Amino acid sequence: MGEKTERGEKAEEGFEPLIVAFCCNWCSYAGADLAGTSRFEYPPNIRVIRVMCTGRIDPTFVLEALRMGADGVLVAGCHPGDCHYQKGNFIMEKRFGYIKKAVDSIGMEPERVRLEWVSASEGGKFAALVREMTQQIKQLGPSPFRLPQSSA
Amino acid sequence: MIEEPRIGVFICHCGVNIGGVINVPEVTEYASKLPRVTYAEHSLYTCSEAGLDAIRKAIAECSLNRVVVASCTPRTHEQLFRETVKEAGLNPYLFEMANIRDQCSWVHMHEPGKATEKAKDLVRMAVAKAALLEPQTEPEVEVKDASLVIGAGVAGMTAALSMANQGFKVCLIEREKGPGGIVRRLYKLYPTLASSSEVVGPLVKAVKSHGNIELMTSTTLKEASGYVGNFNVILATPNGDKEANVGTIIVACGALNYRPPQGLYQYKVLDKVVTQEELDGILRRDALGKPERIVMIQCVGARKGEIRPSALEAFPRSDTAELLRKILKARKEEGWPYCSRICCMNAIKNAILIKENSPKTDVVILYGDLRVYKEYEDFYKRARDLEVRFVRHIEEIPPEITQTPEGKLDVAAYDALSGLEVNFKTDWVALSTPLRPRRGEVLLARMLKVPIGTDGFLMEAHLKLRPVDTNVDGVFIAGTVSGPKDVSESIISGEAAAARASILMGNKKVRTDAITALVDEDLCIGCGLCEELCPYGAPKVEVGKSKIREILCRGCGSCAAECPRRAISMRHFGDHQILEQVKALLAPAG
């Protein structure tokens, strides 16, 4: 995989990243819906997979997505203290530290994976987050694992 | 073993909502060629009776055993489609949705080509998951036939009485020393000019004397746990903590009147500048006398500015309590962005009261927009007949208030019709201020997991379709806790919340989601990590193996993700099902 020194120099002309998002049903998926209801536009580079809680998100989901060529993975859940299941997001937050380390250890930029809190009322925040993350991943360039047939 | 999947895909135009952006026929054509898809069609509204009929018919005619609908969000429509496939003889869990409206056409309106490609991806992912879906049975839980109502204002008392009259036990708690809420402190109510005690008095009496209602004043909610049908709550009472077990909860803890900061329109600087709420008190004490003139200013601290999402994004990691604290602080200075909808009628009511007592007093109402809907138009006409003067002023130039040498007030405003400055020498100025959310609701919302909107009020499950439900099953909202309402609207929402709660309690049982955890005993080593993690105490290690008590499991899946032996799987959200979606997106076969 790419050397660390090459990071940030991979931005390609016309590169459209593909971002996989795991959103919890109660807050972030609802927030993403609200972005739609409010007609807050954001780049079409994201594909949301709904799970009931961020606590459900096994590290292998994130790592497998990256292995299969996702340029970025977003994990979005309820704000601390707001988890529908009391503490699923805390469990995820702890787990996310390991995920970041794993991503780093396989030679990928840890910024390709993000954990964010988006509540059911934060449609604007969800849209802004996708805009920002898409931009960020564009800067990083395509994933080194990207398969030829996967495209945004 | 799963039978060979025969998937039907139904793609919705949602009028122009989807069809106006996404090329629906193209996506349908694409879907029809996906592996295991037997049938694909598109319709104008899949959720219409014709659309649902088409699903039922296709299931029968093409022997479909899985259904995918690509339309809006599962949060509002999954239940409807599940019922539909169930009517056609399929297990309701053999259904999957692709959200191509809220998360596609609505947010990529100006990129139809890319939106169409994204819709294809989303459909492909849903089809991939659908192929692996398995039938599930929803467990039934008993619903305790008792309810907790938080807040003994008009809405809370109405809800409590409604449920009590249906034979349910109600625990009604109130943080103040007595019941009655904000209305108890008012003098007269619009449009009947009935005294507020005529409304609150009978309610309080009925609540106090009802055998099924236990009214607890100076009491607040301290802790809440459990789930629909079976909530365990701890109440902080003057005599110490008290536990209760209830099936449903109605939150009706009201709102507050906004008080302008000192100095705004000379409030708290000049004695005779008061809020409408304070004027109401002055009228009750008959302390106004017969002044020459009184000027009322509408929309003070209401419809000002806007809570921008960007302002909230400054606190990405802050929790809700912190967020609300910041909203409230900023709003104290700036006022609130919404129309509080009761202030126009309130001002007219006070104007009529003054005019009827003292016809010679000149009452001037300075407004930007006057919102008197439905029968309140008559109320407004009544004020006009009494010669109350309605003056439309330029809101962007706020009126200035100064004291004249003779001790009167001078209100300088810009008349919107003439564009000229007008001056009113007046004895009193009354500021019409909105209802605003209460800070205490933050803690409450956090305990009950009900989300708070950016305006600080508790959020309903759906603004239009589910106005008294919340995101939490078994928890309902009534009255001004979800936004400004007048007395009759509070009564309506109290009755509505009681009806919603009574359906659950009346049925005695409720089916809960089948999305629960399952242990593979061959893999389980009985380490007990799941037992440690679960906030509901669902897993229990017995004789070296973990067992999940389905009824206690809420389906978050934290245990499944953490299990070191991967012995725990989730129904309907299995590892293989989720990974199949990932694979379908990134590395589709063929």
Image: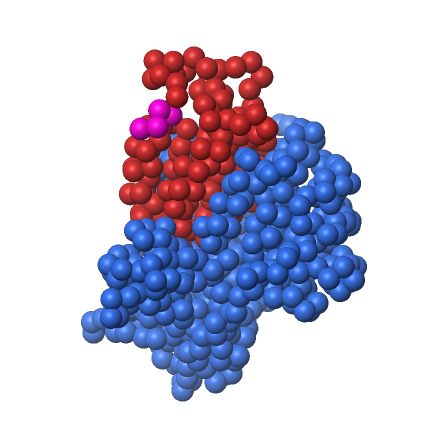
Chain colours: A red, B blue
Q: Main secondary structure of the magenta part?
A: loop
**Foreground residue, B383 or B338?**
B338
Residue B35 placed where, x, y %?
66, 45
**Foreground residue, B445 or A9?**
A9
State the residue lying farthest toward the bottom. B211
Residue at point 48%, 54% (across, down): B573
User: The N terminus of chain A is located in which quarter?
Assistant: top left
Find residue A119 and report its image quarter.
top left
**Foreground residue, B19 or B82?**
B82
Is residue B134 visible to the viewer in this orientation of the structure? yes
Q: Is residue A60 left or right of residue B113?
A: left
Q: Is residue B17 magenta?
A: no
Find residue B557 and report its image quarter.
bottom left
Residue at point 28%, 66% (across, down): B545
Q: Is residue B111 left or right of residue B429?
A: right
**Foreground residue, B511 or A73?**
A73
Residue B38 placed where, x, y %?
73, 52
State the residue lying farthest toward the left. B240
Residue A66 placed where, x, y %?
44, 33
* Total tally of numbered discs in the picture: 0
Residue at point 60%, 64% (across, down): B92
Residue at point 32%, 53% (across, down): B565
Give above or below for B549 relative to A9: below
Magenta region, residue range: A105-109
User: The C terminus of chain A is located in which quarter?
Assistant: top right
Residue B514 placed where, x, y %?
49, 65
Q: Is residue A77 left or right of residue B218?
A: right
Is residue B397 visible to the viewer in this orientation of the structure? no
